[in-house]
Amino acid sequence: MTTHASRRLALCLAGFVSATTASAADVSDAHRSISSDGTPALASSSTAAPAAGFRGRLAPGLAPDAEAEFPAERYSAAEMADFAARYRPMVAPGARGDDQLAPESVLGADRRFRVYPSESGYPYRAVGLLTFNQGTGSYTCTGWLISADTVATAGHCVHSGGTGGVWSNTMRFYPGRNAASAPYGSCTAKRLSSVAGWTKNADENYDYGSVKLNCTVGNTTGWLGRWWTTGSQANLPIAIVGYPGDKPSATQWGGAGRIAASESRKTRYFLDTAGGQSGAPVIQADGTGPGGCEGDCGIAIHAYGADSLGRNSATRITEAVNTNLQNWINTP
């Protein structure tokens, strides 16, 4: 037990602080926003409601990279070989040698399917590849647009976790990246954000974050909506779309199934994933679901591999998570 937890327990036993109050205070602090440049998030005066997706303004005659920071590119075979050699797929810190947390996992036969974002269109083009440096390594993750200039992803993609952790740097986002093709251009990061539960405590229950971009490419590609509920998510149809590192470099892949277990802060499923898909959206996958979703609402952020029952898992988008995501959208 940590010193903080021991002190808190002693106070509870002595009657100075109730266990309920202590728990509520700890949870509130765990969701406290932390940013890479110290900019405070613009907090709303009320809880953020579920948000609808936006299909984007892409239309004939409009350049797909019109609002990107850097133009569309097509990389040579030599450049792709260099990319593959340089970048490793990111896995959660606890999965890098801790036998209690496995990297994202393919569960038996591989049931994933290749996605071609330009041809498939929205919402796939709103999901993108993140490249960045963290510590001494270079990595890839997945992120998804939640506004014109804001990307949701896993906390461990933006910060290595815990008080001794470091922020990622040289972050770049490629929406709808398809191997050697970056048809919508790319954008660098203005700011990274996460929460104290991750940046201070490295608690997997709070492993989520965002990237504020130096562009408004989401106006072109569109962005995903967000939906949360206090009820069970069990058996909801879902899809997970991202950039797994066990497939050809910078290619987008998806998987579909149903939620196997719904917990207060985690969502678990038997869908195949791999390192590099950290940060991918867990999408409510049909138009008949709750919250007005039309198959384009994120309900969790993929982050972890197989547990003791062989289920991959995500950080669930709760009321508090959704409010932070909205606050990060609102912060210039």
Image: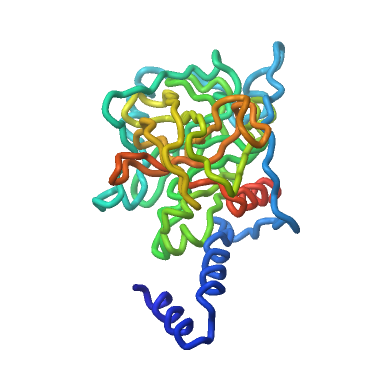
Q: Residue 28's image quarter?
A: bottom right
Residue 187 or residue 201, whichever sits in front? 201
Residue 308 or residue 191, whichever sits in front? 308
Q: Residue at x 48, y 54 (%)?
A: 206
The image shows a total of numbered marks equal to 0
Image quadrant where one finds the N terminus: bottom left
Where residue 87 appears, as percent x and y from the top left, is 36, 36
Q: Residue 36's image quarter?
A: bottom right
Residue 294 or residue 242, whichever sits in front? 294
Residue 226, compared with residue 64, is above or below; it is: below
185 left or right of 147?
Answer: left
Q: Residue at x 28, y 46 (%)?
A: 308
Residue 268, compared with residue 181, is above or below; it is: below
Where residue 136 appears, as percent x and y from the top left, is 34, 49
Q: Residue 297's image quarter?
A: top right
- Coloured how? rainbow
Where residue 287 appears, as percent x and y from the top left, is 62, 25
330 left or right of 202?
Answer: right
25 left or right of 292?
Answer: left
Q: Residue at x 70, y 11 (%)?
A: 60
Q: Residue at x 35, y 43 (%)?
A: 91
Pick out the residue farthest to the right. Answer: 45
Where residue 41 appears, as percent x and y from the top left, is 66, 56
